[in-house]
Each structure stands twice: as C-alpha cells, then as structure tokens.
Image: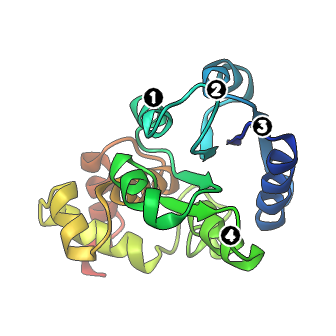
Amino acid sequence: MTVYVIDSHPLMRDALTMLIQRIKPGLKVVPVHKMNALDSAVLKGGEPELICMELQLPDTLGMSGVQMVRANHADVPLAVVTASDAQDYEAASMHAGANVFIEKTEPVNQVLQKLRELLVTEDESQESTGSAPTKLSKRQKQLILMLDQGLSNRDIADKLNISEHTVKVHFWRLFRRLGVNSRTQALHFARTHGWLGI
C-alpha cells in the first residue's frame, strides 16, 4: 500500500512525507505535484492507503479535487491540507468527502495526530501474524454489531456521530483486516469466529 501526497509546493510535499514516515517508518510515499498526475502515479505506485492533498491545486477549483479523489477512490482515507482558514473551507471539504482537514499553520503534533488517525488502526500494534486476526478494535466490534443489525452507512454514521465517509474508511480497514470484500463476507467471518457475542 502507498500514500500519495498531492501538493504543488515541493517543500510541503517533503514535509508531509517526513511526517507520514514518522508515523509509519518505511511506508511508501509518492509525491504528486498536481491532481491530473494522480491516476498515472497510482498505476505505477499501487493502490493508495491514504491520499493527502492540497486543497488549492493549480488544476482544481473549489472542491473539485476532493470530488475527483472521491469519484475514483471512494473508500480511501483522504486528508485535505490548506493554507486557508478552517472556517472558510473545513465544512465544505468534509461535506465533499475529506476525512480530516489540516491547516498548514497547525502545530506539528496536531498534524501528526490527524494523520495518525487515518494511518494507524487502534489495534495495529497488536495484530496477529497469523492469517486470521485474533483481536478487533473497539470501533471494529461496533461495526460488526451494527452490520448484524442491518444498519446502513448513514445509520451507522448517525449512531457514531461521524461522517458517512469515515464509516466507509472504517469498513475499508475492517475488510482489509479480515481479508474480505463485502459486508456479507464480514458477517460470515464474524459468525464463524464467534464474534457476534462481543
């Protein structure tokens, strides 16, 4: 898996790359200088684990960059980075599909925390090396139970007080964790392993 950093400023691309690699040393980070170069970068670099993009790119207007990422990578975590004030763009960015909104003027520790939430699962450090996971995070347990109740993404978002896009990211992580591709497969896996009593 690969992280793509889309920013028109070389120094900012380097800074974000360094922060991401502080969170996950050795993670492959591919710098991209404009939105139109993302598709070819993904073809060469592999499927994204995270996309971190500048809001005001030379070849985007308003929320068009966020919308383009969501159209092609619907369930991939997306961090929007901007030099603009949060009150001007944060709500619109989140509505368009961003999972986190980062102002370039924020303290480094805050930026690290926001990126860490998208890159590191709650129980990643405790993951089993075997083919089947032995432990689910609290959030993953909630998702399994809500799947069993037949709740939609919108219902789950309302119950957890998070966005639908964040729900999709949680499912993406859960499916990858279990090695499944759908809600039905995830439920079957949970039942098979006796996790519906969690």
- Residue denoted by label 3: 30
Residue at figure coordinates x 65%, y 68% from the top left? 116
Q: Quadrant of the C terminus?
A: bottom left
Which residue is nearer to you in this view: 99 or 147? Answer: 99
Q: Residue at x 65, y 56 (%)?
A: 83
Q: Position of residue 107 (x, y in %)?
A: 73, 77
Q: Residues within 10 Å of mark 3 (few under 14, many from 20)?
A: many
| Residue for badge 2 | 38
Q: From the image, which quarter does the N terminus lie in?
A: top right
Q: Position of residue 155 (x, y in %)?
A: 15, 63
Amino acid at circle 2: Leu
Within 10 Å of disc 4 (Cα), the crowding (few <14, some 14-19, many 20+) is many
**Count of labels shown?**
4
90 vs 101, left or right, is left
| C-beta proximity under 8 Å, tags 2 and 3 | no
Q: Marks 4 and 2, Cα distance to the nearest angstrom?
A: 23 Å
Q: Secondary structure at mark 4?
A: helix
Indicate the quadrant where residue 45 lies: top right
Q: Earlier in the sequence, mark 2 or mark 1?
A: 2
Q: Are marks 3 and 1 in contact (CB under 8 Å)?
A: no
Front tag of 4 and 3: 4
Q: Which residue is mark 4?
A: 111
**Residue pictured at 51% horizontal, 61% vertical:** 100
Counting from the top left corner in percent of width and height, residue 160 is at 27, 75
Residue 97 lies, in percent from the top left, at 39, 48
Instruction: Report how far apart the C-alphas of labels 1 and 4 lie in the structure.
Output: 25 Å
Q: CA distance from mark 4 to mark 3?
A: 19 Å
